[in-house]
Image (spheres, rainbow, N blue to C red):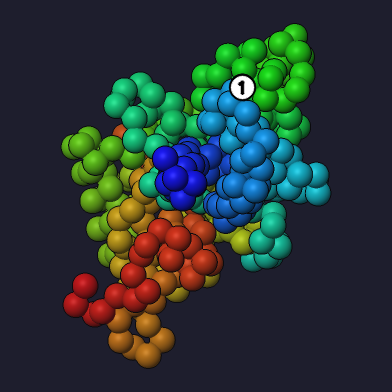
Amino acid sequence: MSDQATAQDLESGLEGYRKELTGYCYRMLGSAFEAEDAVQDTMVRAWKNLEKFEGRSSLRSWLYRIATNVCLDMLHAGNRRARPMDLTEATPVAQARLTARPEITWLEPVPDGRVLPSVADPADTAVERESIRLAFVAALQRLPAKQRAVLILREVLAWKAAEVAELLDTSVASVNSALQRARASLAEYAPSDSDPADPLDEEQQKLLERYVAAFEGYDMTALTALLHEDATMSMPPYDLWLRGHDDIVGWMLGVGEVCRGSKLVPTVANGSPAFAQYHPGQDGEGYEPWALIVLEVADGRIGAMDFFLDAKRWFPLFGLPERLSSGD
């Protein structure tokens, strides 16, 4: 085999792990864009150091070692990405003010297709989806970086303790201890159960159709009928968040009135149902990107609505149209 063919085979082998590595780095970093940067850095480092790869471990293990080191380096700055509800208390609508925080603060949404590899086992698929939920990834961000890596590798990716110990250059005892501490910490912030996005679930599809009809019709009675009583609403990059029907409706009929007349386009994000929200265009024609809405659905109702307002940042990532015509 020629050197060129060997190089092509190695490059193909590296690329075959890109999606699962992106999912791993996303869980570590809480940012879709930083995860892609981390994976690109991983690939570059791997390519430059291929002569050092002696085959004593699998190519996959070697790549995860590099990716882990890249993520740990990126996390040394000490920034922890979070959701608004991780930083402040819920605000009564009468006191609500929009205060933006820097982009680096916020946990970011991610398209399922960029981080979830195709797996045949439905149980594995469920674990993968659950482990990229916004609430779960936010809980991960509370863990020290190495505990975070251990928990993801052991609990999400099902690595053996000995494999994780080798990757982190530590002992099995240290890995087990870190996992125990991580589990205890995560239990304090454990997110409630939710229903994953499932296009084959007829009941969920009916719920989402009713949500679209209520939102596009700006019918607050119909909308709140779909929400749990303690449902939450957040709007990164603003640190404001609201809880309960009265405050959500108060906001939607106050400052949020600008959302009247919007159009919603379905997508999926973080293993959950999501929508691209398009706002009536300022020129009076068509619809412009406004927000990416990620929903948390549990027991047949909506428990959370997270509006990521920097639409021009998110829509290209999700492959969404730049604009909708009036006929769409």
Q: Position of residue 262 (x, y in %)?
A: 34, 70
Q: Is residue 67 visible?
A: no
The relative height of residue 282 versus residue 29 in the rendered view (above or below) is below
How many residues crowd around disc 1 within 10 Å: few (fewer than 14), some, or many (20 or more)? Answer: few
Q: Is residue 253 left or right of residue 191?
A: left
Which residue appears at 43% of the width and 65% of the height? 315
Give the structural element (helix, strand or loop) at label 1: loop
Q: Position of residue 101 (x, y in %)?
A: 70, 62
Q: Position of residue 94 (x, y in %)?
A: 61, 60
The relative height of residue 247 versus residue 53 in the rendered view (above or below) is below
Q: Amino acid at mark 1?
A: Arg
Which residue appears at 58% of the width and 26% of the height? 55
Which residue appears at 33% of the width and 53% of the height? 267
Q: Quadrant of the C terminus?
A: bottom left
Q: Is residue 145 left or right of residue 92?
A: right
Q: Position of residue 205 (x, y in %)?
A: 23, 43
Q: Quadrant of the N terminus?
A: top left
The relative height of residue 61 versus residue 208 in the rendered view (above or below) is above
Residue 61 lies in quadrant: top right
Total tally of numbered discs in the picture: 1
Q: Is residue 37 visible?
A: yes
| Farthest right residue in view | 77
Q: Is residue 226 left or right of residue 132?
A: left
User: Residue tagged by mark 1?
Assistant: 56
The relative height of residue 281 versus residue 230 in the rendered view (above or below) is below
Residue 24 lies in quadrant: top right
Between 306 and 23, the one lying in front of the other is: 23
